Image (cartoon, rainbow, N blue to C red):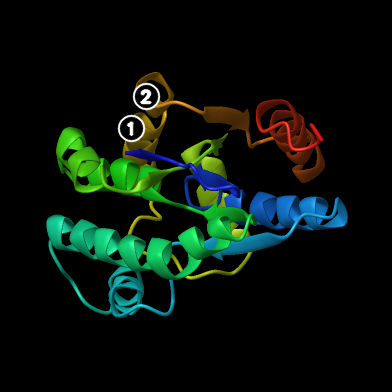
Amino acid sequence: MEKNTFEGKFIVFEGLDGSGQSTQAGLLKEFLMKKGFNVVLTKEPTLYSEAGKRIRKILDKEIKVSPKELQELMVEDRKEHLEKVIIPALKEEKIVISDRYFLSTFAFGSADGLDLQELIKMNNQFLYPDTVFLLKVSPSICIERIKNRGDRVDLFEKEGKLSEVWKTYKILPDRLENIFIIDGEKSIEKVFEKVKEIIIKHLNLWKN
Protein backbone atom coordinates (compact mmCIF):
# COMPACT_ATOMS: atom_id res chain seq x y z
CA MET A 1 0.00 0.00 0.00
CA GLU A 2 1.18 3.50 -0.75
CA LYS A 3 2.34 5.78 2.04
CA ASN A 4 0.78 9.24 2.19
CA THR A 5 3.44 11.66 0.92
CA PHE A 6 1.05 14.60 0.47
CA GLU A 7 1.05 17.61 2.79
CA GLY A 8 -2.43 16.82 4.08
CA LYS A 9 -3.21 14.14 6.69
CA PHE A 10 -5.47 11.14 6.15
CA ILE A 11 -7.46 9.84 9.14
CA VAL A 12 -9.87 6.90 9.12
CA PHE A 13 -12.50 5.70 11.61
CA GLU A 14 -13.42 2.01 11.62
CA GLY A 15 -15.60 -0.32 13.67
CA LEU A 16 -18.70 -2.46 13.65
CA ASP A 17 -21.97 -0.90 12.53
CA GLY A 18 -23.23 0.91 15.61
CA SER A 19 -19.79 1.38 17.14
CA GLY A 20 -19.99 5.17 16.89
CA GLN A 21 -17.35 5.78 14.23
CA SER A 22 -19.56 8.28 12.35
CA THR A 23 -20.17 10.27 15.54
CA GLN A 24 -16.47 10.40 16.41
CA ALA A 25 -15.49 11.34 12.86
CA GLY A 26 -17.90 14.27 13.00
CA LEU A 27 -16.60 15.40 16.39
CA LEU A 28 -13.01 15.29 15.17
CA LYS A 29 -13.91 17.40 12.14
CA GLU A 30 -15.48 20.05 14.38
CA PHE A 31 -12.52 20.00 16.77
CA LEU A 32 -9.90 20.38 14.04
CA MET A 33 -11.82 23.10 12.23
CA LYS A 34 -11.98 25.10 15.48
CA LYS A 35 -8.19 24.72 15.61
CA GLY A 36 -7.97 26.35 12.19
CA PHE A 37 -7.44 23.30 10.00
CA ASN A 38 -9.15 22.81 6.66
CA VAL A 39 -11.00 19.51 7.00
CA VAL A 40 -12.87 17.23 4.60
CA LEU A 41 -15.23 14.64 6.13
CA THR A 42 -16.16 11.79 3.81
CA LYS A 43 -17.32 8.18 4.03
CA GLU A 44 -17.47 4.79 2.32
CA PRO A 45 -19.28 3.48 0.49
CA THR A 46 -19.82 6.76 -1.31
CA LEU A 47 -23.23 7.87 -2.55
CA TYR A 48 -22.08 9.39 -5.84
CA SER A 49 -20.28 6.63 -7.77
CA GLU A 50 -22.21 4.00 -9.70
CA ALA A 51 -20.47 1.32 -7.64
CA GLY A 52 -21.41 3.13 -4.42
CA LYS A 53 -25.07 3.35 -5.42
CA ARG A 54 -25.12 -0.37 -6.22
CA ILE A 55 -23.43 -1.20 -2.90
CA ARG A 56 -26.14 0.70 -1.02
CA LYS A 57 -28.84 -1.38 -2.71
CA ILE A 58 -26.96 -4.58 -1.81
CA LEU A 59 -26.57 -3.56 1.85
CA ASP A 60 -30.25 -2.63 1.97
CA LYS A 61 -31.00 -6.12 0.62
CA GLU A 62 -32.72 -4.75 -2.48
CA ILE A 63 -30.45 -6.82 -4.73
CA LYS A 64 -28.26 -9.83 -4.05
CA VAL A 65 -24.71 -10.50 -5.30
CA SER A 66 -21.87 -12.82 -4.32
CA PRO A 67 -19.48 -11.73 -1.52
CA LYS A 68 -16.68 -11.43 -4.09
CA GLU A 69 -18.74 -9.15 -6.34
CA LEU A 70 -19.66 -6.95 -3.37
CA GLN A 71 -16.01 -6.46 -2.44
CA GLU A 72 -15.05 -5.79 -6.07
CA LEU A 73 -17.66 -3.02 -6.06
CA MET A 74 -16.16 -1.70 -2.82
CA VAL A 75 -12.74 -1.53 -4.49
CA GLU A 76 -14.19 0.22 -7.54
CA ASP A 77 -15.97 2.76 -5.34
CA ARG A 78 -12.80 3.29 -3.26
CA LYS A 79 -10.71 3.99 -6.35
CA GLU A 80 -13.10 6.75 -7.41
CA HIS A 81 -13.29 8.03 -3.84
CA LEU A 82 -9.52 8.43 -3.73
CA GLU A 83 -9.25 10.01 -7.16
CA LYS A 84 -12.12 12.49 -6.79
CA VAL A 85 -12.15 13.36 -3.08
CA ILE A 86 -9.30 12.13 -0.89
CA ILE A 87 -6.16 12.74 -2.95
CA PRO A 88 -7.22 16.17 -4.30
CA ALA A 89 -7.89 17.30 -0.72
CA LEU A 90 -4.57 15.95 0.55
CA LYS A 91 -2.77 17.76 -2.25
CA GLU A 92 -4.38 20.97 -0.98
CA GLU A 93 -2.94 20.28 2.50
CA LYS A 94 -6.35 19.49 3.97
CA ILE A 95 -7.04 16.93 6.65
CA VAL A 96 -9.25 14.15 5.29
CA ILE A 97 -11.36 12.16 7.73
CA SER A 98 -13.03 9.09 6.27
CA ASP A 99 -15.81 7.14 7.95
CA ARG A 100 -14.64 3.67 6.83
CA TYR A 101 -11.98 2.68 4.32
CA PHE A 102 -10.30 -0.55 3.23
CA LEU A 103 -10.19 -2.08 6.74
CA SER A 104 -13.96 -2.47 6.38
CA THR A 105 -13.36 -4.52 3.25
CA PHE A 106 -10.93 -6.77 5.12
CA ALA A 107 -13.23 -7.30 8.11
CA PHE A 108 -16.63 -7.54 6.41
CA GLY A 109 -15.26 -9.46 3.42
CA SER A 110 -13.63 -12.03 5.71
CA ALA A 111 -16.89 -12.42 7.61
CA ASP A 112 -18.49 -13.26 4.27
CA GLY A 113 -16.01 -16.11 3.78
CA LEU A 114 -13.43 -14.42 1.55
CA ASP A 115 -9.69 -14.90 2.06
CA LEU A 116 -8.10 -12.04 4.03
CA GLN A 117 -4.86 -12.12 2.07
CA GLU A 118 -6.78 -11.89 -1.19
CA LEU A 119 -8.76 -8.93 0.14
CA ILE A 120 -5.54 -7.17 1.13
CA LYS A 121 -4.15 -7.84 -2.34
CA MET A 122 -7.27 -6.29 -3.92
CA ASN A 123 -6.52 -3.05 -2.03
CA ASN A 124 -2.73 -2.95 -2.17
CA GLN A 125 -2.60 -0.10 -4.71
CA PHE A 126 -4.45 2.30 -2.43
CA LEU A 127 -3.19 5.05 -0.14
CA TYR A 128 -2.54 3.99 3.44
CA PRO A 129 -3.98 6.30 6.16
CA ASP A 130 -1.76 8.22 8.56
CA THR A 131 -4.00 7.22 11.49
CA VAL A 132 -6.77 4.66 11.88
CA PHE A 133 -9.13 4.64 14.86
CA LEU A 134 -10.77 1.27 15.47
CA LEU A 135 -13.66 1.52 17.94
CA LYS A 136 -14.17 -1.63 19.98
CA VAL A 137 -17.82 -2.24 20.89
CA SER A 138 -19.44 -5.63 21.51
CA PRO A 139 -21.80 -6.84 18.77
CA SER A 140 -24.75 -6.96 21.19
CA ILE A 141 -24.32 -3.31 22.13
CA CYS A 142 -23.94 -2.36 18.45
CA ILE A 143 -27.22 -4.07 17.58
CA GLU A 144 -28.95 -2.36 20.51
CA ARG A 145 -27.66 1.05 19.37
CA ILE A 146 -28.82 0.44 15.79
CA LYS A 147 -32.31 -0.50 16.97
CA ASN A 148 -32.50 2.43 19.41
CA ARG A 149 -31.75 4.98 16.70
CA GLY A 150 -34.51 3.53 14.53
CA ASP A 151 -32.33 2.55 11.59
CA ARG A 152 -33.25 -0.33 9.33
CA VAL A 153 -31.02 -3.37 9.77
CA ASP A 154 -28.76 -3.92 6.76
CA LEU A 155 -27.00 -6.98 5.35
CA PHE A 156 -24.31 -7.25 8.04
CA GLU A 157 -26.22 -5.98 11.07
CA LYS A 158 -26.83 -9.25 12.90
CA GLU A 159 -25.02 -10.16 16.10
CA GLY A 160 -23.49 -13.38 14.76
CA LYS A 161 -22.26 -11.66 11.61
CA LEU A 162 -20.81 -8.73 13.55
CA SER A 163 -18.94 -11.19 15.80
CA GLU A 164 -17.29 -12.64 12.70
CA VAL A 165 -16.44 -9.15 11.46
CA TRP A 166 -14.73 -8.29 14.75
CA LYS A 167 -12.57 -11.43 14.60
CA THR A 168 -10.76 -9.88 11.63
CA TYR A 169 -10.80 -6.31 12.90
CA LYS A 170 -9.02 -7.28 16.12
CA ILE A 171 -6.05 -8.93 14.36
CA LEU A 172 -5.43 -6.07 11.91
CA PRO A 173 -3.34 -3.93 14.33
CA ASP A 174 -0.85 -6.82 14.45
CA ARG A 175 -0.54 -6.85 10.67
CA LEU A 176 -0.85 -3.18 9.75
CA GLU A 177 0.57 0.01 11.25
CA ASN A 178 -0.96 3.14 12.75
CA ILE A 179 -4.15 1.42 13.96
CA PHE A 180 -5.34 2.50 17.41
CA ILE A 181 -8.04 0.47 19.17
CA ILE A 182 -10.29 2.56 21.42
CA ASP A 183 -12.94 1.33 23.85
CA GLY A 184 -16.08 2.58 22.14
CA GLU A 185 -18.39 1.44 24.94
CA LYS A 186 -17.48 4.45 27.07
CA SER A 187 -19.40 7.71 26.80
CA ILE A 188 -19.13 9.71 23.57
CA GLU A 189 -17.16 12.36 25.46
CA LYS A 190 -14.63 9.91 26.93
CA VAL A 191 -14.13 8.19 23.58
CA PHE A 192 -13.47 11.53 21.94
CA GLU A 193 -10.98 12.54 24.64
CA LYS A 194 -8.96 9.45 23.68
CA VAL A 195 -9.27 10.31 19.99
CA LYS A 196 -7.93 13.81 20.64
CA GLU A 197 -5.08 12.48 22.76
CA ILE A 198 -3.94 10.12 19.99
CA ILE A 199 -4.30 12.74 17.25
CA ILE A 200 -2.22 15.26 19.16
CA LYS A 201 0.53 12.75 19.96
CA HIS A 202 0.57 10.72 16.77
CA LEU A 203 0.13 13.34 14.05
CA ASN A 204 1.81 16.19 15.94
CA LEU A 205 -0.38 18.72 14.13
CA TRP A 206 0.65 21.56 16.41
CA LYS A 207 4.40 21.18 15.91
CA ASN A 208 4.67 24.58 14.23
Left or right, 106 with respect to 137, comes to: left
Give me the residue at 70% from left, 29% from top.
198
Left or right, 198 with respect to 108, comes to: right
Give me the residue at 39% from left, 35% from top.
166
Using a 10 Å C-alpha cutoff, classify the residue at mark 1 as few (fewer than 14 neighbours), some (14 to 19) or many (20 or more): some
Residue 30 at x, y = what percent?
79, 57
Residue 206 at x, y = what percent?
81, 36
Q: Which mark is residue 113?
A: none
Q: Secondary structure at mark 2?
A: loop
Looking at the rendered image, the quarter that the N terminus falls into is top left
Seen in the picture, residue 117 relative to 17 is either above or below; the reply is: above
Q: Kindly tell me whether residue 127 is visible in this rendering.
A: yes
Q: Which residue is mark 1?
A: 168
Q: Kindly tell me whether residue 45 is visible in this rendering.
A: no
Question: Cβ–Cβ below 8 Å for labels 2 and 1?
Answer: yes
Name the foreground residue: 125 vs 42. 125
Name the foreground residue: 157 vs 21. 21
Q: Secondary structure at mark 1?
A: helix
Asked which quadrant contains residue 89, the reply is: bottom right
Q: Which residue is mark 2?
A: 171
